[in-house]
Structure formats: structure tokens, C-alpha cells
């Protein structure tokens, strides 16, 4: 449809419905939902609208990530393409996952860094592994306290 039709579909809650369909067992239905989701996200970019945040709110990013394990290679490829194209940097999210910077009376939490590992001996697909950052000291106005966890 036209961008106007797509925008109307989104306003009526179409993204949450599509994201729910991504979790059904029928591979053909999932493929159609992925194609529709890609068309909507592309139209959103053309119109300057952030439909990515609506997909995330509808647990669509989680559904797309789980489709990276799908046995159907076309579904896997489309899910990876959508994630890399529209969610690769996750800039669409508000800074909800970022902690404030450390100051005299504040504390800071580090985010995990992600390292891609080649799993060519397995499925041939790259997998992300989370590498925890070292703990940062925190202070509530008293002496600085460092807590370290041993493995």
C-alpha cells in the first residue's frame, strides 16, 4: 500500500499484530509477516517516523532475534537483515539502558560489550557473546567502596 495506508495500519496497532505472528509455527506465515514488517519499517524511514520503537515495544526485536535460530534459512536471513538494517545500532531506543556517569555522589553501571564469535563449526552462523565489563566503584557520599566478584 501507500505510505498513508501503512501509517494508518501502524496507528491501528498493526505492528503489534505482526510481531505476534512472528512467533507462530507456520513458516510461510512468518515469512509474510517478516516481509510486511520490513515494508512498514522502510516506509517509516521514508516518512521520518520511528516505527522501530513500536516494534521493540511489541517484543518484535526479541521475536526477530529468536528467528535467527529458525530452521528455515530464508526466515533466518530475513530476520538478520531486518535486525541489521533497522535495529543494528539500537539508536531508536531512548537511553533507558544507560546509567548516569559517575560523580562524587553518584554511581555508574557498565553495559556489557558484545563480541561476535564465528561459529563455523556449528551452524555457520555468527553468534554474539556478552563480555561483562569490570565493575565500577560507587559512592553514596562516604568512602569509595570496591566490590569485586570472583568467578
Image (tube, rainbow, N blue to C red):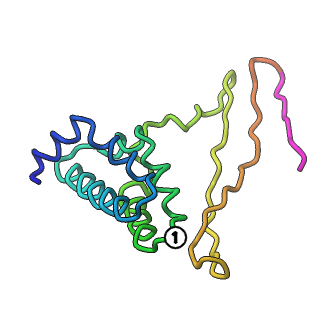
Q: Residue furthest top?
A: 141
Q: Residues within 10 Å of mark 1 (few under 14, many from 20)?
A: few
Residue drawn at point x = 45 percent, y = 74 percent? 73
Closer to the camera in the image, 137 or 73: 73
Q: What element carries label 1?
A: loop
Return the x and y of residue 57 as percentages of the image width and height: 41, 38
79 left or right, relative to 146: left
The N terminus lies in quadrant: bottom left
Return the x and y of residue 62 as percentages of the image width and height: 50, 49
Q: In which quarter of the image is residue 103?
A: top right
Residue drawn at point x = 42 percent, y = 43 percent? 56
Residue drawn at point x = 19 percent, y = 42 percent? 9
What's the magenta region?
143-151
Return the x and y of residue 76 as percentages of the image width and height: 46, 68
Q: Quadrant of residue 148?
A: top right
Return the x and y of residue 11 as percentages of the image width and height: 21, 35
The vertical placement of 55 against 138, above or below, is below
Answer whether residue 145 is magenta in the image. yes
Closer to the camera in the image, 23 or 107: 23
Closer to the camera in the image, 101 or 13: 13
The vertical placement of 34 against 16, above or below, is below
51 left or right, relative to 69: left
Q: Residue furthest right?
A: 150
Residue drawn at point x = 34 percent, y = 46 percent? 52
Task: Count the labels in the image.
Answer: 1
Answer whether residue 90 is magenta in the image. no
104 left or right, relative to 71: right
Quickly name the residue at label 1: 71
Q: Main secondary structure of the magenta part?
A: loop
Amino acid at each position: 500500500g501507500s505510505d498513508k495506508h501503512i501509517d494508518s495500519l501502524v496507528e491501528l496497532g498493526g505492528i503489534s499484530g505482526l510481531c505476534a505472528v512472528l512467533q507462530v509455527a507456520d513458516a510461510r506465515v512468518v515469512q509474510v509477516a517478516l516481509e510486511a514488517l520490513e515494508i512498514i519499517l522502510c516506509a517509516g524511514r521514508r516518512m521520518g517516523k520511528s516505527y522501530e520503537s513500536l516494534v521493540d515495544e511489541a517484543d518484535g526485536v526479541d521475536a526477530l532475534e529468536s528467528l535467527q535460530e529458525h530452521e528455515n534459512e530464508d526466515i533466518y536471513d530475513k530476520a538478520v537483515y531486518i535486525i541489521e538494517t533497522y535495529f543494528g545500532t539500537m539508536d531508536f531506543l531512548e537511553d533507558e539502558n544507560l546509567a548516569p556517569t559517575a560523580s562524587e555522589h553518584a554511581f555508574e553501571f557498565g553495559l556489557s560489550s558484545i563480541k561476535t564469535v564465528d561459529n563455523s563449526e556449528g551452524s555457520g552462523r555468527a553468534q554474539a557473546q556478552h563480555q561483562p565489563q569490570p565493575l565500577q566503584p560507587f559512592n553514596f557520599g562516604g568512602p569509595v567502596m570496591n566490590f569485586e566478584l570472583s568467578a
